[in-house]
Image (cartoon, rainbow, N blue to C red):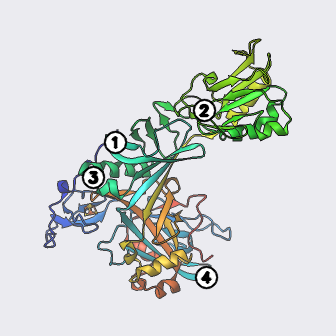
Amino acid sequence: MTQPLSRDPEDALSPDDSADTSDASGEVVRCDACPVLCRIRKGQAGACDRYANEDGKLVRLDPLLLLQRRVDAGGAVVPFLEPGKPWDGRLISASNTFVTGVGATTTYPDYKPAPFIVASKAEGVDVVTVVTEGIFSYCGLKLKIDTDRFLGPERAAVRAAGEQVGHVTTAEYGSQMLALGGVRHLTGGSKKEGSVTCEAMLKLANREPVDLAIDGGASLRVQAGAAPIVNGEQELRMRVGCGSATIGIFAKQWLGHADEVIVVDDHITGVLTEHQAGRFLCMRPAGIRVRGRRSTPGRYFKVAEPGQGWGGTDITDPLAIIDRIDPKTAWPGLRLLMVSTTGEDAEFFVLDAALKPVRAPMPAPLRAVVERIAENCEPALTSVLFMGGAGGSLRAGVTENPVRLTRSVRELVTRVTCGGAPVYVWPGGGITLMVDVLRMPERSFGYVPTPALVLPIEFTLPIAAYREMGGHIDSAVDLETVLREGRWRAEGWRDGNPWPVTTK
Ligand code: SF4
């Protein structure tokens, strides 16, 4: 169960905008990394648990994360920082070491240069990576939940700990989608709604499980990269396709073993002999008419209500979707297979003398195709994508002329990454990005109790372009300076993520 954020800013601070309330003894230091401006007593952490007063000094509790390639672009093994050990002064290849925004600290207000502006070389060209932990009040998560089961009506409220934290949005192919967070839930409701929303987003972004309940729908346990649990049952398979697609894939394999196959699906139910696939195979019409609205031959919409039954419908007896059997077309002994889009549910019938379907043992060739449907289903997972707008004041930490950063991103001169992970930048104004949290380092996200999420973000570009855009070039440092002066830890580069420090 998601609980509201446990730390209230007032637990750790006495906000005082009028003066720098750090005292000379260091008993209290003021953190100015976000608008909360915590005054932190010695030995304590600030409201977000990211900063602390260590012996009178303000420190970021998580060290800066460096990611290293073991092998460079030419295939040579490169020197590597040893995890958990301080830098021994050996030459470390800046071309193979990426300084991420994880643990980088935040600057506030934004006009101050970003915490790290790191110079390096890529393919002989001088480049910089501007690194920060951005505070995102405008952000949300998109959850893709691989299941056919009905989770709730479109636009229904999604709740955590009783608070609305998002809504059900349009379903995608084989997946139900939720939109969580967003500035309205963070700032537009009660304080509790904001903090519960922030907590649910933080946990999901950091790959923790979260329990959600959907008004008029299911209860869920979701976690990035894990199978969703719907009403207490773990979802196993993502469907092979809609009912029509399933017919298209397997029609030939059913030929000769069944006279009719109906693939039950909440969206598009397929009927083999009417479907183009059956016609191409010259199958004899079976005269079995299913309920719902006929879209095109062999493709039916709304054969039942959505639910937890066969193919995401509410039916548990497949015969319930048969509207009528035409005596002029059907015949006694007709072999009918009914199957769901995951192969989880399947039954075999033979029409008796009165053309009534009678359950019968499924012949082995049909059983094999049902099993093949299941085999062709991918494992059901929950995917969590963070979406946020970096087009606001965060840009001022990069350049004095923020619109030039936006243009540079759009012109693909500046590469944007989050903890080294590639992002998708939406077209149109601003820098509105999406990133898969599973491609980021673990526990990349933080929060501040304004409430907002904290996201590591890096901008990498040639130094000439950085100078031209009015970047804070005087604040650029080399990797050795970062290693010498900062608290850091090193991890290996994540396979599958493109190396971002490149001029191509
Ligand atoms: S909430 Fe965190 S970042 Fe903000 S002032 Fe307090 S300690 Fe600093």
> What amino acid is found at the position of numbered circle 2 in the picture?
Val
Say left or right for 471 vs 120: left
Residue under circle 3?
A: 189
Q: Closer to the observer: label 4 or label 2?
A: 2
Question: Which is nearer the eye, 401 or 46?
Answer: 401
**Disc 4, disc 2: CB below 8 Å?**
no
Tell me the amino acid under the disc marked 1: Thr
Q: Which of label 1 and label 3 is nearer to you?
A: 3
Q: Amino acid at mark 3?
A: Gly
Mark nearest the camera among 1 and 2 is 2
- Seen as rendered, the residue at the extreme front is 328
Q: Earlier in the sequence, mark 1 or mark 3?
A: 1
Mark-to-mark CA distance, 4 and 1? 50 Å
Element carrying mark 3: loop
SS state under label 1: loop
Mark earlier in primary sequence (4, 1): 1
Q: How far apart are the two marked residues, 4 and 3, measured between alpha carbons?
A: 52 Å
In which quadrant of the rendered image does the N terminus lie?
Answer: top left
The answer to whether 105 appears left or right of 145 in the picture is left
- Can residue 101 be seen from the camera position used here? no
Quadrant, the C terminus: bottom right
Residue shown at the point (38%, 66%) measured from the top left = 134
Along the line of sight, the residue nearer the viewer: 98 or 6: 6
Mark 1 Cα-neighbour bin, 10 Å: few <14, some 14–19, many ≥20? some
User: Whole-Å distance between the Cαs marked 1 and 2?
Assistant: 37 Å
Residue at mark 4 to residue at mark 2: CA–CA distance: 63 Å
Residue pictured at 78% horizontal, 33% vertical: 273
Residue 183: x and y, percent?
35, 58
Relative image position of residue 105 (x, y in whole percent): 35, 67
Query: Pointer 2: what residue?
Result: 303
| Residue receiving disc 4 | 124
